Amino acid sequence: MSPVIELVERVDDQDRVLGVVSRDDAIRHGWLHRVAATVCRDERGRFLVSRRAAGLSRFPGYHEVSFGGAVTVGESYQAAARRELEEELGVSVPVHEMVKFLCHGQIGSYWLGVHEAVITGDVVPDPRAMSWVGWMTRAELDEAMQRRRFVPDGQEALRRYLKAHETSSGSRA
């Protein structure tokens, strides 16, 4: 069985489409492309946190506070965020874009659309992607980020999310 080639839109520094490339080529050549991520909260305001599976090629065993992946050809950031939540957590919930920025990440630069979702039911994490998931309060998350390895790009997404959340709600998240 041949590997699936994930096609993405190569974009410029203004997020305008330049063409279609494989995600592997985009990463290998440092071409900008689009990624969607979602910060998940519950009705009590806790954050959903995961530990990445040991067999993953990027950041195995690291903790993560956002869920997401590449935006495919012709897909919106919001549609990609919803799709990734269904694939990774088995939930179908509305997502709301909070912020979009040019992320200069650990494996290259890309446009990152950060979303928010409120999850009220159970999640069914994909065991190929995650070895653990759990809910944390903001204080617990802050402490965990000091003690555990978290994906650096996810930390930046969280910082931008919290800033956008504070701006939109007029209060601290």
Image (cartoon, rainbow, N blue to C red):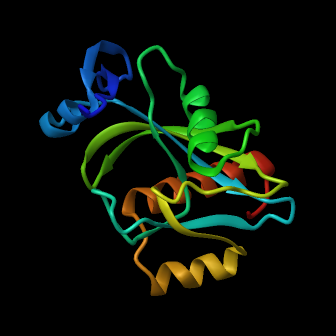
Position in image of residue 76 (x %, y %): 54, 22
Q: Is residue 51 left or right of residue 17?
A: right
Q: Is residue 24 above or below residue 119?
A: above
| Residue 104 position in % (x across, y down) | 30, 47
Q: Residue at x 69, y 74 (%)?
A: 138
Residue nearest the viewer, comparing 140 with 127: 127
Left or right side of 23 for 79:
right
Q: Nearer the viewer, residue 59 or 35?
A: 59
Q: Quadrant of the N terminus?
A: top left
Which quadrant would residue 81 be assigned to in this image?
Answer: top right
On the rendered structure, is 136 left or right of 125? right
Nearer the observer, 134 or 12: 134
- Residue situated furthest left in the rendering: 29
Q: Residue at x 47, y 14 (%)?
A: 74
Residue 77 locus on image (x, y percent): 54, 28
The quarter of the picture where residue 19 lies is: top left
Q: Give x and y (percent) for residue 107.
A: 24, 51
The residue that appears at 51% across and 19% down in the rendered structure is: 75
Residue at image location 62% in from the left, 43% down from the top: 85
The quarter of the displayed image where residue 97 is located? top right
Q: Quadrant of the C terminus?
A: bottom right
Q: How many marks?
A: 0
